[in-house]
Image (cartoon, rainbow, N blue to C red):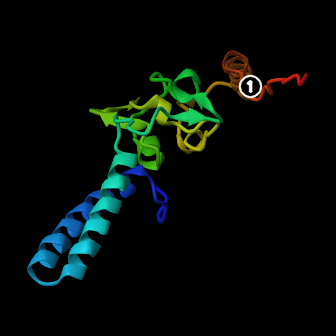
């Protein structure tokens, strides 16, 4: 696992800690000094915002996209060949997007659409080569079809009269 990288899990922890610290400052500020109350309110607001932005399963800020295309329509995510997989969990430990999850003695792709489009950095870490992704050609075709469907990148021609 890489160190020093802020991911959604660490931002969630920071957000929750900021909310609690902010609330403590607000209460302490009401009792002791007004300035601490204002600092506490700001800190709690920042913490709550971080928590909401990074909270899994709740998309208050809209759905995930990739280059303006809905991420749920892009079928780019890993698949595991269970004939090869030993359940070692290296992929689950490595993935900073938390796509994988250990379930008993095996690893599953629990959150496929959290996988970054075109990222395959977990594949070479699998000691038995059990992780597969669509080919780059398949990805290109998928993105082209979605761009045609959603009109991404097409400029409307406006005629002036």
| Above-or-below relation of 144 to 103 | above
Q: Nearer the viewer, residue 73 or 81?
A: 73
Q: Pinpoint residue 98: horizontal percent, then vertical percent.
A: 42, 42
Q: Pinpoint residue 28: horizontal percent, then vertical percent.
A: 13, 77
Residue 102, picture quadrant: top left
Q: Pinpoint residue 128: horizontal percent, then vertical percent.
A: 53, 35
Q: Residue furthest left?
A: 31
Residue 57, picture quadrant: top left
| Above-or-below relation of 56 to 11 | above
Q: How many marks?
A: 1
Q: Nearer the viewer, residue 106 or 5?
A: 5
Query: Seen in the image, is 135 located left or right of residue 5?
Result: right
Query: Seen in the image, is 114 located left or right of residue 123?
Result: left
At 38% from the left and 56% from the top, the residue drawn is: 11
Residue 140, picture quadrant: top right
Quarter containing the C terminus: top right
Q: Residue furthest front?
A: 161
Residue 2 visible in the picture: yes
At 18% from the left and 66% from the top, the residue drawn is: 23
Residue 77 visible in the picture: no
Residue, disc 1? 140
Q: Pinpoint residue 37: horizontal percent, then vertical percent.
A: 21, 74
Q: Residues within 10 Å of mark 1 (few under 14, many from 20)?
A: few
Label 1 element class: helix
At 71% from the left and 27% from the top, the residue drawn is: 152
Q: Nearer the viewer, residue 78 or 30?
A: 30
Q: Residue furthest right?
A: 161
Query: Seen in the image, is 87 located left or right of residue 75?
Result: left
At 40% from the left and 41% from the top, the residue drawn is: 89
């Amino acid at each position: 696992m890489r160190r020093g990288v802020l991911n959604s899990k660490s931002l969630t922890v920071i957000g929750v800690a900021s909310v609690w610290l902010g609330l403590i400052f607000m209460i302490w500020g009401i009792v002791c000094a007004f300035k601490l109350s204002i600092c506490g309110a700001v800190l709690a607001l920042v913490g709550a915002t971080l928590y909401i932005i990074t909270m899994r399963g709740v998309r208050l800020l809209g759905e995930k996209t990739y280059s303006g295309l809905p991420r749920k329509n892009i079928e780019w995510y890993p698949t595991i060949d269970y004939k090869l997989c030993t359940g070692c969990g290296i992929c689950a430990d490595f993935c900073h997007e938390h796509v994988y999850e250990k379930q008993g003695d095996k690893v599953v792709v629990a959150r496929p659409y959290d996988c970054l489009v075109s990222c395959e950095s977990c594949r070479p870490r699998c000691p038995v080569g059990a992780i597969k992704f669509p080919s780059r050609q398949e990805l290109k075709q998928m993105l082209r079809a979605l761009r045609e469907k959603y009109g991404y990148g097409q400029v409307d021609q406006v005629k002036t009269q």
